[in-house]
């Protein structure tokens, strides 16, 4: 008479253990990290927040290693996490809409950066990349182009605008001067000019500012040329009307490059060769290098202006 009760007791224990596992370990999914994965991508594909993933797996940072096994929170934990997110969503900013990009043969972070208009560091941060190395087939997450802010809006030194930017070149109020304002002594002087321009990289951006503690786009251009004995006007509106007009394909180091912003306002930078220009960016809050063929700038390019010319050897 004792043995049936013994078997019944063992059965109850097994049942309780099974129920316990069904609410914990057995309800949890496992995911093996692949090369190129990021916490952001995994969270979106599996429908669970980054914080929930980090909490469940005891992760302190955002870095992952290939073949690392992650525990995916159970549906109950997901729901609790979603409710917590909803309660705090009113006080937090919405994340940027993201696009995915599959790395192709020959791709580099620098090339992708030029194409999408975001810096290499920004792309690395978005995808938790420890280095700049990429693999064919790797998936990168990039912000959608339309979400990028319309930077430099109204950045004209004193809030002035350029009239009739949308009109053909010949119909502007005053045509630009036919010749540059000066000449380079030699190519070495122009190379020195580019090096001086690069020493300003990282200087903070400040609308209306004109010092190393904060500077805007037109003041940056003016200050650089002052070092090389050329006095430029203070505002972008005035700078737009001086010097010699240059086509995009004929730009040389030292030329000014202009871009259209909201309404009839404009933004200016200095071309340094290799399709690059340096400018005081309100979007990045500092003086930085960008690329003319980045979609954001390519679509807004107005014209180039030659301030100093290098005499061609005969």
Image (tube, helix red, strand yellow):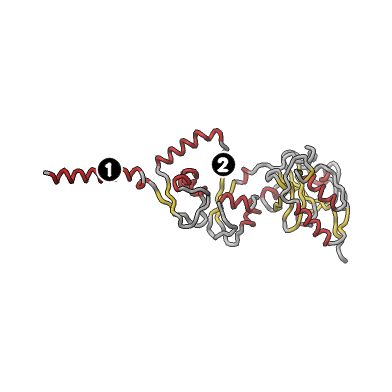
Q: Which mark is residue 51?
A: none
Disc 1 target residue: 16
In what element is the residue under mark 2? loop
Tell me the residue at 58%/59% (across/down).
133
103 left or right of 217 in image = left
Quadrant that contains the C terminus: bottom right
Tell me the residue at 54%/33% (across/down).
90
In what element is the residue under mark 1? helix
Give how far across and how far down residue 205 sits, in percent. 73, 44
42 left or right of 12 in image = right
User: Which corner quadrant of the image does residue 106 belong to?
Assistant: bottom right
Mark nearer the N terminus (1 vs 2): 1
Disc 2 target residue: 95
Q: Residue furthest bottom?
A: 314
Quadrant that contains the N terminus: top left
Residue 120 in sight: yes
Q: Vertically, is 136 above or below 162?
A: below
Tell me the residue at 80%/48% (across/down).
221
């Amino acid at each position: 008479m004792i043995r049936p009760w013994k078997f019944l007791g063992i059965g109850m224990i097994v049942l309780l253990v099974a129920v316990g596992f069904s609410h914990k370990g057995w309800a949890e999914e496992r995911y093996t990290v692949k090369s190129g994965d990021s916490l952001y991508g995994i969270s979106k594909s599996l429908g669970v927040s980054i914080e929930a993933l980090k909490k469940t797996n005891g992760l302190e940072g955002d870095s992952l290693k290939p073949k690392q096994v992650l525990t995916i929170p159970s549906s109950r934990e997901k729901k609790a996490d979603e409710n917590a997110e909803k309660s705090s969503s009113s006080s937090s900013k919405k994340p940027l809409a993201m696009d995915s990009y599959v790395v192709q043969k020959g791709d580099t972070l620098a090339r992708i950066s030029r194409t999408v208009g975001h810096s290499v560091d920004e792309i690395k941060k978005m995808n938790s990349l420890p280095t700049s190395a990429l693999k064919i087939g790797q998936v990168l997450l990039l912000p959608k182009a339309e979400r990028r802010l319309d930077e430099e809006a109204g950045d004209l030194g004193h809030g002035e605008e350029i009239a009739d930017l949308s009109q053909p070149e010949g119909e502007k109020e005053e045509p630009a001067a036919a010749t540059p304002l000066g000449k380079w002594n030699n190519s070495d002087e122009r190379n020195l000019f580019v090096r001086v321009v690069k020493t300003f990289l990282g200087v903070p951006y400040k609308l209306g500012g004109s010092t190393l503690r904060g500077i805007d786009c037109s003041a940056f251009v003016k200050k650089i040329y002052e070092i090389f004995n050329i006095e430029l006007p203070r505002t972008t509106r005035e700078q737009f009307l001086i010097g010699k007009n240059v086509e995009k394909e004929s730009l040389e180091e030292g030329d000014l490059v202009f871009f259209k912003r909201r309404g009839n306002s404009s933004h200016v930078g200095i071309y340094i060769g290799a399709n690059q220009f340096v400018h005081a960016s309100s979007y990045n809050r500092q003086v930085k290098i960008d690329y003319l063929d980045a979609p954001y700038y390519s679509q807004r390019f107005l014209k180039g202006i030659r301030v100093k010319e290098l005499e061609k050897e005969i």
